[in-house]
């Protein structure tokens, strides 16, 4: 049964790139729900939920093995425990309560995973719908959390229909109604109003490990670009400390003599510290800097290094911790022009960061990335898809310049405008239509209200379960095939 739960938990990874079977997300959780519902006791269902969560994380994070090594097994098992409550509730709740409550518990799990100290929210179920602008319209209302809620509610309704054959039409009708919510919202909501156009070039030199050769290749591609409003290089595109290396600074200033360029510095500074920094160079010679705030666990720092530092000896985990920045900034490539919100790589996974730079006035979200360590995995495509979700949430175009691919651009509704895959070198030039700085989506204004409401429902359910519990007595129904999932 453990193997079955692990396998059921791994299935949702098929909904993300590269498999790209996003349509599976509407019923991919059903096997797991049926396994938990058929458990002989609530405690057993909770354990099955744990194994389900472990399988989910193992499949979703398999590409981190170069950085974590065998530590992935520990990470997946520990954080898989978050699904114990989901499993227990699937066994304990009555059918129609399950349709309302189980999506809330799932959203709470995802919301907890989005807390930076717990690693980060990779593979949120709602992000599987990145290629469907109609479904992404829900993100403008309630963020990725609302998409996840609807997906889990549909899955639960289908499971209820399978478990309650005498009342099958009601949950199936509810599932259909929930699936129609997104197209209706998409039809009635108007697109974000466009104030002006903004041309961006995304430079992708490919896998070039030598810093000098990488810089030279970036220069070569940049010199061949047409006239644009901003040139964006990928993460770690400059392996030198720009503040102290006058030769590199002069080369970059020459490139920026006519067009603003956003580069990314990954080097040890004069004090011996290493950070990832987005540096905007303007034709007037001025610069702005943003230092990456959310670092990649094990890739850029090792959580609780005193306990887990040994991972650096058996894998490519961070040999030393990089220094994080202190907060987000908004930059202006030209006076009075379009404002950009620079974010770096893993930061595209966090909904709050996109919303924060939007509130500060950013009209375009600009991500710089490098995934060469995971070049042959599903990670680059999954990473690129996150920009579409952030675009839909904030009502802002979003672009990602990836050093080794995937570089991509999306409009303010999450529709793809351009893409360079991992096997390409060169540049993608896109024209974006940007909203006024003051434009806000409901999600921009209201924030994570969906997740907070879900937390309230989940907490209430937990209190009700505790109040009804009796020592030595299982409150689950005796005939799981007749009742609820």
Image (cartoon, helix red, strand yellow):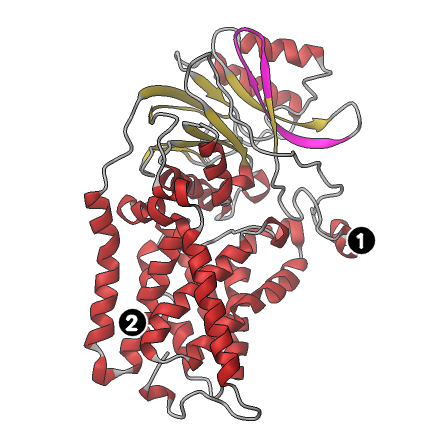
Specify start and end residues of the magenta stretch as a single range: 273-288
Whether residue 27 is visible to the viewer of this picture, yes or no, is no
Q: Nearer the viewer, residue 126 or 425?
A: 126
Helix, strand, or loop for circle 2?
A: helix
Q: How many marks?
A: 2
Q: Which residue is mark 2?
A: 158
Circle 2 residues within 10 Å: few <14, some 14–19, many ≥20: many
Judge from the rendering whether residue 215 lies leftward or rightward of residue 28; answer left or right. Answer: right
Judge from the rendering whether residue 81 lies leftward or rightward of residue 137; answer left or right. Answer: right
Quarter of the image with the C terminus is bottom left
Q: Residue at x 43, y 80 (%)?
A: 91
Q: Nearer the viewer, residue 397 or 465?
A: 465
Q: Nearer the viewer, residue 86 or 455?
A: 455
Magenta region's main secondary structure? strand
Q: Nearer the viewer, residue 388 or 86?
A: 86
Q: Please give the label number shown on residue 306.
A: 1
Marks 1 and 2, how far apart at CA: 47 Å
């Amino acid at each position: 049964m453990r193997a079955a739960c692990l396998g059921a938990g791994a299935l949702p990874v098929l909904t993300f790139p590269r498999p790209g079977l996003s349509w599976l997300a509407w019923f991919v959780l059903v096997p797991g729900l049926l396994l938990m519902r058929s458990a002989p006791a609530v405690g057993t269902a909770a354990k099955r939920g744990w194994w389900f969560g472990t399988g989910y994380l193992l499949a979703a994070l398999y590409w981190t093995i170069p950085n974590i090594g065998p530590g992935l097994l520990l990470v997946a098992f520990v954080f898989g425990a978050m699904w114990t409550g989901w499993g227990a509730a699937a066994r304990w709740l009555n059918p129609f309560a399950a349709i309302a409550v189980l999506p809330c518990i799932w959203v709470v799990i995802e919301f907890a995973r989005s807390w930076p100290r717990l690693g980060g929210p990779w593979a949120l179920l709602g992000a599987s719908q990145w290629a469907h602008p109609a479904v992404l319209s829900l993100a403008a209302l309630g963020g990725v959390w609302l998409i996840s809620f609807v997906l889990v509610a549909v899955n639960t309704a289908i499971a209820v229909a399978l478990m309650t054959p005498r009342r099958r039409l009601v949950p199936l009708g509810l599932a259909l109604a929930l699936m129609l919510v997104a197209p209706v919202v998409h039809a009635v909501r108007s697109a974000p109003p466009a104030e002006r156009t903004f041309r961006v070039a995304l430079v992708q030199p490919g896998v070039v490990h030598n810093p000098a050769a990488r810089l030279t290749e970036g220069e070569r591609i940049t010199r061949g670009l047409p006239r644009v409003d901003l040139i964006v290089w990928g993460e770690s595109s400059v392996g030198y400390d720009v503040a102290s290396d006058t030769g590199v600074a002069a080369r970059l200033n020459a490139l920026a003599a006519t067009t603003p360029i956003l580069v990314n510095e990954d080097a040890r500074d004069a004090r011996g510290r290493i950070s990832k920094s987005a540096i905007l160079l303007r034709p007037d010679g001025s610069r702005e800097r943003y230092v990456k705030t959310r670092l990649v666990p094990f890739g850029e720092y090792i959580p609780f290094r005193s306990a887990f530092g040994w991972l650096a000896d058996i894998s490519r985990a961070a040999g030393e911790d990089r220094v994080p920045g202190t907060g987000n900034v908004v930059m202006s490539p030209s006076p009075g022009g379009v404002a950009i919100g620079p974010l770096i790589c893993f930061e595209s996974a966090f909904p709050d960061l996109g919303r924060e730079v939007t509130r500060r006035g950013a009209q375009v979200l600009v991500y710089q990335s490098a995934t060469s360590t995971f070049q042959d995995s599903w990670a680059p495509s999954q990473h690129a898809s996150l920009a579409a979700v952030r675009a839909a949430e904030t009502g802002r175009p979003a672009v990602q310049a990836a050093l080794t691919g995937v570089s991509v651009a999306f409009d303010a509704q999450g529709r793809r405008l351009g893409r360079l895959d991992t096997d390409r070198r060169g540049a993608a030039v896109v024209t974006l239509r940007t909203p006024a700085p003051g434009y806000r989506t409901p999600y921009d204004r209201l924030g994570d209200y969906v997740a907070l409401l879900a937390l309230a429902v989940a907490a209430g359910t937990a209190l009700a379960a505790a109040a009804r519990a009796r020592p030595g007595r299982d409150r689950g129904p005796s005939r799981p095939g007749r009742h609820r999932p």
